[in-house]
Amino acid sequence: MNDTPTPDTGAPILRSVGLRKSFGSLDVLKGIDLDVKRGDRIAIIGGSGSGKSTLLRCLNFMERPTGGQVILDGERIGDARVAKDGSETITYRERDLMAVRKRVGMVFQQFNLFPHMSTVENVMEGLVTVLRRPKAEARERAAQELARVGLGDKLDVYPGRLSGGQQQRVAIARALAMDPEVLLFDEPTSSLDPELVGEVLRTILSLAEDGRTMLLVTHELGFAYRFATHVIYLSDGVVHETGTAEEVFRNPQRDKTRAFIARSSEFSL
Amino acid sequence: MGYQFDFSMVIKILPVLWRGVIVTVELTIACLAVGLILGFFVALLRVSPAAPLRFVGRAFVEIFRNIPALIQLIWFFYAFPIVIGAQLSPFVAAVLGISLNTAAFSAEIYRSGIQSIERGQWEGAMAIGMSRAATFRRVVLPQVFRRMLPAFTNRAVEVAKVTSLASVLSVHELMYQGRVLSSTFYRPLEILTTVGLVYLVMIYPMTWASAAMERRMRRRA
């Protein structure tokens, strides 16, 4: 892995090819092709049950795909074995998945902060146990990340004493501290009180200004439009329509997309 | 009733009862230490992804939880020596019997604690690249200990009480001393009442602490 940021040569940092996921007999993802280039900000939208969260969760292997490929920086994740009849089974080694997750961070709907650790300890945890940084250095880095999300004065506070919006910003700082090449947001504002949504969205937008590569699953179409360079509209486990934010939101080509977007007040005209 | 109470000799027997208290405390600590440590490993078997290991853990728990502690003590003292071909001291037999019983119950406390930790905690840790083992150690376990502290305190109370069974193996703990003294002085009413009160004084603070912890946790939740 090299440390200098690679200029956007057009080669995708993260790809999925024919990605499939089923839970029992329920096919949630039915073959998703996705190209994420460095600096891309992709909003994944769709109705509930469309598979958008599952797609995101397959990209860092919170869920293991049942078929297809995830390719990170040109390298396919998992060991594929082709049987005599041509069918392919993929096995994943924990070590490989850990390596992926170091490079592809995630922010959850429910924050998933560690309640027995202070905010700074939450943010340090990955630096110390995964990246093996010395504690003092990790703490300093964690403090920087917390300052960046506007919580520089809350280092020693426990998550239980923070508002939902603050907790989500700590979770963002925790993900950022790992210097991920791609950052995944899984409905980051869906469990927040309306008045707390803004502070989290502003934080995410500020990361966009830094040129971060991000994927966002959201119901907030107005925000998706401001945030995204590209939009994927998912329906019934397939990519129904995709394009730039301008194309998908202002000039959707397919009826279903148009109907979905019209349901949101921001785009109802 | 016409019974003449005579508590005067209670003063005389206090030193003997005190020796009993010491042995009861020793038994309690030994059984808790062995039981909590062993129980932890049994709990690991119980939550293991491998079915045979889960079965072993389950079998351990059900055997030592469903056979009365008294039977276990007597078995380890009278039957176990035939299996291993060596006699155990009463104290060791008592510790074995009570610890295994304690391990079975505490394994269930650990297990329910581990399973009560939300999936999101695992995901939050794994999403920053932590291994399952590191997640368990750094994120899950500390929360299990915290969440289960009242239950563990309850278990300690039970162990303290159950050590009185060791008197049947002539371990010189509090109950044994009480029985010997009451037949020496022919004063079972005064002496056994005193023994009961000594247990109460020893154990009630633990019960109180456990209840207080539970109250505090409920307030925090």
Image (cartoon, rainbow, N blue to C red):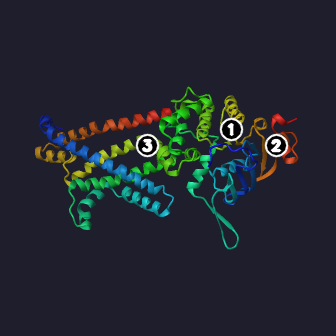
| For marks 1 and 2 on the same chain, the one whose residue lies earlier in the sequence | 1
Q: Which residue is mark 2?
A: A244
User: Which chain letter matches label 3?
Assistant: B
Residue that badge 3 annotates: B145
For the C terminus of chain A, the image quarter is: top right
Mark 1 to mark 3 CA distance (whole Å): 31 Å
Q: Amino acid at mark 1?
A: Ser
Chain ID, mark 2: A
Are the residues flagged by discs 3 and 2 from a single subunit? no
Q: Which residue is mark 1?
A: A190
Does residue B109 sit above or below A228 in this rendering? below
The image's mark for residue A25 is: none
The residue sitting at 79% across, 47% down in the picture is: A233
Query: Up-down: is A87 above or below A8?
Result: below
Q: Residues within 10 Å of mark 1 (few under 14, many from 20)?
A: some
Give residue B216's quadrant in the image: top left
Q: Give x and y (percent) for residue A31.
A: 75, 57
Direction from residue A123 to residue A201 in the image, left or right: right
Q: Is residue B3 visible?
A: no
Which residue is at 31% across, 54% downward?
A: B69
Residue B166 in the image: state x and y as whole percent. 24, 52
**Amino acid at pointer 2:** Thr
Q: Residues within 10 Å of mark 3 (few under 14, many from 20)?
A: some
SS of the residue at dot 2? strand
Q: Residue at x 67, y 73 (%)?
A: A84
Q: Amino acid at mark 3?
A: Phe
